[in-house]
Structure formats: structure tokens, C-alpha cells
Image: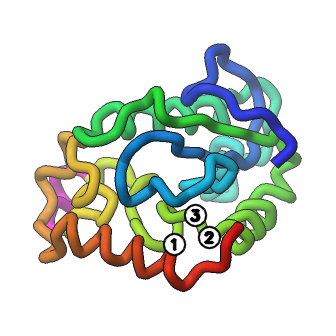
């Protein structure tokens, strides 16, 4: 990647929508074989209201910065991760290119938190939906308060780590 990595979240708010990658450079054993240029997660930030077809306006929105900040809060909450071990890269895009760019990045890099350890980008489903199962991400990285209210998934941290190892063994080197 040609864009320099920045701290997660970036130090200064900025305007725009687009795509981003998160990179892990810490000691968590399941991720130590991952190079620092390989994203652990790829995501996007669409214009407000886009999902409901209400708006595609991008002027003045800090949606991309807010999304990165939200992810920083999830990492901070995790008992076994340290925010200082994360970096991010982002690209402000015209909304028409956001979905396609995200799909291409995920297909190219197969980020662990997108293809193996599901649930990093989840939000609190609220009290009426706490009958859902806890995500793999919240099983492996416990700490988000709302996730403790969800049903156990019947999968242990060791099961999730094994899935990561299996994923790496089937990958070609990047």
C-alpha cells in the first residue's frame, strides 16, 4: 500500500466518505504471522442515509473519521488488544466507488476480521435482540459491554484461533 498508515483513530477529524483498512502490529499470537501491510480489517463509510436511499450528499460529513473512531472504541474495550498496536489507512471516494472498492480490497487481502473472525463492525443490537449469538470477534476479544448480554455461541477462543490458523495455512504468502 502506498498510503502511509496513521494512528487509530487519526489525530485530527476530517471530512469525507470512503474506504479504510485497519492494520495490526502487536503481539497477539494469532496475528503475529500477518505482515504490517496486510489489513486485519477492511471497511467503508457511506454518506449518511445512503443505506436507506435517502441521501448521497458528502459535503460536510465526517462519516469516515467517525467510523474509524468507532472502531477505536471497540479495540479499546477488548481485554486482550491494545489500541497503540493498530494503524489505519483510508481513501476518500465518491460514493459510487465505495462498495466496489471495499469488495476488491477484501477479495485481494482476505482480512482476518472480514473473512474468518466475524463481528468486529457490529453494533449493540439492543435489548430486544439480545437473543442473538455473540460474534466470533467478541468471543476472541471480550470486552464490549453490550456483547456480554448476547447468547454464548458455543465456540471457544481456541476454536476461533484454530480457524485463523487454518485460514493462514491455506493462504499464499502476501
| Residue occupying the point 18% across, 40% down | 145
The answer to whether residue 28 is above or below residue 11 is below
Q: If you read the primary sequence from the N terminus, does the residue marked by circle 2 or circle 1 appear first?
A: 2
Query: Is 25 inside the magenta-drawn segment?
Result: no
Considering the numbered disc 3 on the image, is that residue within a helix, a strand or a loop? loop
| Residue 69, x across and y down, in percent | 52, 30
Q: Is residue 29 left or right of residue 113?
A: left
| Residue occupying the point 41% across, 54% down | 120
Which residue corresponds to mark 2? 110
| Residue occupying the point 27% across, 42% down | 80
Do the CB atoms of the residues marked 3 and 1 lie less than 8 Å apart? yes
| Residue 34, x across and y down, in percent | 55, 57
Considering the numbered disc 1 on the image, is that residue within a helix, a strand or a loop? helix
- Bin the neighbour count of mark 1 within 10 Å (Cα to Cα): few under 14, some 14-19, many 20 and up: some
- Boundaries of the magenta span: 126-131
Q: Is residue 120 visible?
A: yes
Quadrant location, the C terminus: bottom right
Do the CB atoms of the residues marked 2 and 1 lie less than 8 Å apart? yes
What is the image's colouring?
rainbow
Which residue corresponds to mark 3? 111
| Residue 54, x across and y down, in percent | 68, 51
Considering the numbered disc 2 on the image, is that residue within a helix, a strand or a loop? loop
- Give the Cα separation between the discs numbered 2 and 1: 6 Å
Do the CB atoms of the residues marked 2 and 3 lie less than 8 Å apart? yes
Which residue corresponds to mark 1? 115
Extreme residue in the bottom direction: 170
Q: Quadrant of residue 172?
A: bottom right
Amino acid at each position: 500500500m502506498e498510503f502511509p498508515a496513521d494512528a487509530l483513530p487519526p489525530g485530527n477529524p476530517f471530512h469525507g466518505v470512503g474506504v479504510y483498512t485497519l492494520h495490526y502490529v502487536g503481539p497477539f499470537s494469532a496475528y503475529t504471522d500477518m505482515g504490517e501491510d496486510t489489513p486485519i480489517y477492511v471497511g467503508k463509510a457511506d454518506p449518511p442515509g445512503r443505506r436507506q436511499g435517502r441521501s448521497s450528499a458528502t459535503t460536510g460529513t465526517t462519516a469516515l473519521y467517525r467510523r474509524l473512531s468507532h472502531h477505536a472504541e471497540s479495540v479499546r474495550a477488548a481485554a486482550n488488544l491494545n489500541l497503540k498496536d493498530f494503524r489505519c489507512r483510508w481513501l476518500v471516494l465518491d460514493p459510487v466507488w465505495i462498495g466496489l472498492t471495499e469488495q476488491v480490497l477484501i477479495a485481494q487481502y482476505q482480512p482476518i476480521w472480514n473473512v474468518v473472525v466475524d463481528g468486529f463492525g457490529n453494533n449493540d443490537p439492543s435489548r430486544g435482540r439480545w437473543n442473538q449469538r455473540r460474534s466470533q470477534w467478541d468471543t476472541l476479544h471480550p470486552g464490549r459491554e453490550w456483547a456480554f448480554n448476547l447468547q454464548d455461541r458455543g465456540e471457544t477462543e481456541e476454536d476461533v484461533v484454530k480457524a485463523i490458523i487454518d485460514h493462514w495455512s491455506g493462504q499464499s504468502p502476501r
